Each structure stands twice: as structure tokens, then as C-alpha cells.
Amino acid sequence: MSDCLFCKIVAGDIPSSKVYEDESVYAFRDINPMAPVHILVIPKLHLESVNAVNTANSAVLSHIFEVIPQIAKSEGLENGYRVITNCGEDGCQSVKHLHFHLLGGKKLSESLD
Ligand code: AMP
């Protein structure tokens, strides 16, 4: 999508701190980190949110969850980490391109709200 921030990052039109890339997945450091390690893992395919996942495109989701442990290991998160996706208004999703926050590098808050 031409007006999507994360599509522009995937295309290289907006700079990012890339940590991983393959044919269908891109991962980069969050510009406003909430933890010592805060990486966004996204499908290259533009999907607005988890609500856009269906049987035709869901393979990229399983691939993302294959990639996340690899990134976590390479970032030294042996003691654990958190994966979050925000969806829609009440979920406080600010960028309308499906993304998974990978957070770690410290003992995270028990609160999820
Ligand atoms: P969400 O609120 O779940 O939609 O998360 C969007 C995330 O994108 C936020 O954590 C932002 O800090 C992050 N973000 C916004 N713009 C950029 C950017 N240009 N590069 C890296 N991260 C960004």
C-alpha cells in the first residue's frame, strides 16, 4: 500500500534499523523502544491487522512465529520475552500494518493492559 508507513519501510523508502529479512518477513527496531530489546516483526504483505488474516494468507503468520524465536535467540533473550500485537482502536493500534512487538532484555511488567 503506497501510503502505509511499514510498507514504505519494507520498500526501503523510509529508513529502519533492520534485524531480519527474508522473502515474506521483515523485522526492525522500534523507533520508540519500550524495553532494551523492542523489535517489530511484520509480514511484507500489507495486512491491516490480525483481523485481515485468513486461510489464503495465514502461512505468513506461522512463518513469523518460526522467525521470532530465531530473532529472540540472536538478541540474547534466553531468559524470555513477550510478543504482542495491537488490533484496532481499543487495542491502541497506531500503524495499520500487522506487526508483532518482540519485547525483552529486562523483567517485563506483569500487567498487559
Ligand atoms: P502499534 O501502536 O502497536 O501500532 O505500534 C506501532 C509501533 O511502531 C510503535 O511502537 C512505534 O514506536 C513504532 N514506529 C512508528 N514509526 C516507526 C518507524 N519509522 N520506525 C520504527 N518504528 C516505528
Image (cartoon, helix red, strand yellow):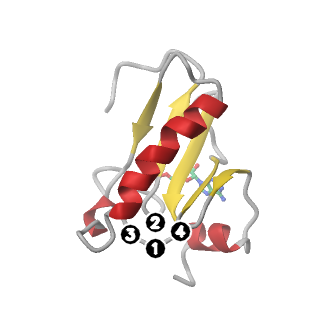
Tell me: 101 left or right of 22.
Answer: left
Q: Return the residue found at the far left.
A: 55
Name which residue lies at 53% across and 65% down.
Answer: 24
Marks 4 and 2 sit apart, C-alpha to C-alpha, by 9 Å
Q: Indicate which disc, 2 or 1, sits on the residue closer to the N terminus.
A: 1
Name which residue lies at 37% across and 50% down.
Answer: 86
Question: Which one is nearer the viewer's eye here, 56 or 96?
Answer: 56
Tag 4 residue: 44
Q: Indicate which disc, 4 or 2, sits on the residue closer to the N terminus.
A: 4
Whether pointer 1 and pointer 3 mark residues with C-beta atoms closer than 8 Å, the reply is yes
Marks 2 and 1 sit apart, C-alpha to C-alpha, by 6 Å
Q: Viewer-nearest of labels 4 and 2?
A: 4
Marks 2 and 3 sit apart, C-alpha to C-alpha, by 4 Å
Q: Indicate which disc, 2 or 3, sits on the residue closer to the N terminus.
A: 3
Name which residue lies at 52% across and 33% down.
Answer: 103
Q: Position of residue 37 (x, y in %)?
A: 62, 32
Res 34 seen here: no
Marks 1 and 3 sit apart, C-alpha to C-alpha, by 6 Å
Tag 2 residue: 97
